């Protein structure tokens, strides 16, 4: 099972905090984490194993969208900062559309991500 993780700059700490809350549960399930470059760096520094792709603005969002379109992902967690402008917003919209087209669960905030992770980890 592979889960993609993305966080805008103002949400990277939230992503690390979120994952830290599920650290024990993640040890007991076979999940591969993949993340955009800078988000992945923060996740690595917190002690998680993660495959890092390009930074979001440099194409990481598009790489994750391609993985979603090829059915390589079971879930995408993208902590977006809705109060800030992002130059790669078209990539963000494309990723969200691809998740909808291919019926891939997408959480854009910690509350939704927590519900999805609780369901995921309760099965194991």
Image (cartoon, helix red, strand yellow):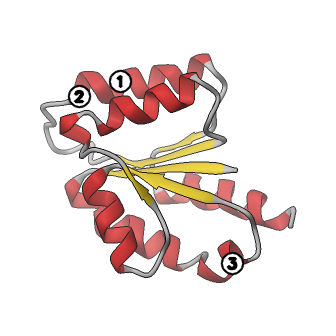
Q: Closer to the observer: label 3 or label 2? A: 3
CA–CA distance between discs 3 and 1?
32 Å
Residue at mark 3 to residue at mark 2: CA–CA distance: 34 Å
Circle 1 residue: 93
Of the pair 14 and 70, the residue shown nearer to us: 70
Q: Give the crowd class for mark 2: few <14, some 14-19, many >=20 residues within 10 Å.
A: few
Q: Which of 40 and 7 is in front in this view?
A: 40
Name the front one of labels 3 and 1.
Answer: 3
Instruction: Classify residue 104 as left or right of residue 9.
Output: right
Element type where label 2 sits in the image: helix
Labels 2 and 1 touching (C-beta < 8 A): yes
Kindly indicate the quadrant of the structure image that contains residue 102: top right
**Residue 91 appears at what percent x and percent y?**
29, 26
Farthest residue, direction right: 123
Task: Kindly check if marks 3 and 2 are in contact, taking CB atoms under 8 A apart as contact.
Answer: no
- Secondary-structure class at tag 3: helix
How many labels sit on residues? 3
Task: Tell me the residue that label 3 is attached to.
Answer: 27
Q: Point out residue 39 in the picture as x, y percentages from the top left corner.
A: 31, 59
- Residue at 72% over, 64% down: 118
Task: Label 1: state its secondary structure.
Answer: helix
Q: Do the residues labelled 3 and 1 touch (CB within 8 Å)?
A: no
Q: In the image, which disc is placed on residue 89?
A: 2
Q: Which of 56 and 113 is in front in this view?
A: 56
Q: In this view, does 100 lie to the left or right of 119?
A: left
For image coordinates 15% across by 44% down, the residue present is 84
Crowd rating for badge 3 (residues with CA inside 10 Å; few <14, some 14–19, many 20+): few
In the rendered structure, which disc, 3 or 1, sits on the residue that comes first in sequence?
A: 3
| Residue 77 position in % (x across, y down) | 50, 49
Q: Is residue 25 above or below residue 51?
A: below
Q: Quadrant of the C terminus?
A: bottom right
């Amino acid at each position: 099972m592979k889960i993609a993780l993305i966080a805008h700059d103002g949400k990277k700490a939230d992503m690390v905090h979120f994952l830290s809350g599920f650290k024990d549960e993640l040890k007991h399930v076979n999940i591969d984490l993949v993340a955009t470059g800078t988000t992945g760096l923060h996740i690595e520094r917190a002690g998680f194993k993660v495959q890092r792709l390009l930074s979001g603005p440099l194409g990481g969002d598009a790489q994750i969208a391609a993985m979603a379109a090829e059915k390589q992902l079971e879930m995408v967690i993208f902590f977006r900062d809705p109060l800030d402008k992002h130059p790669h917003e078209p990539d963000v919209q494309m990723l969200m559309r691809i998740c909808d087209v291919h019926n891939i669960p997408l959480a854009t905030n910690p509350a939704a991500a927590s519900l999805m992770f609780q369901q995921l980890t309760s099965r194991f």
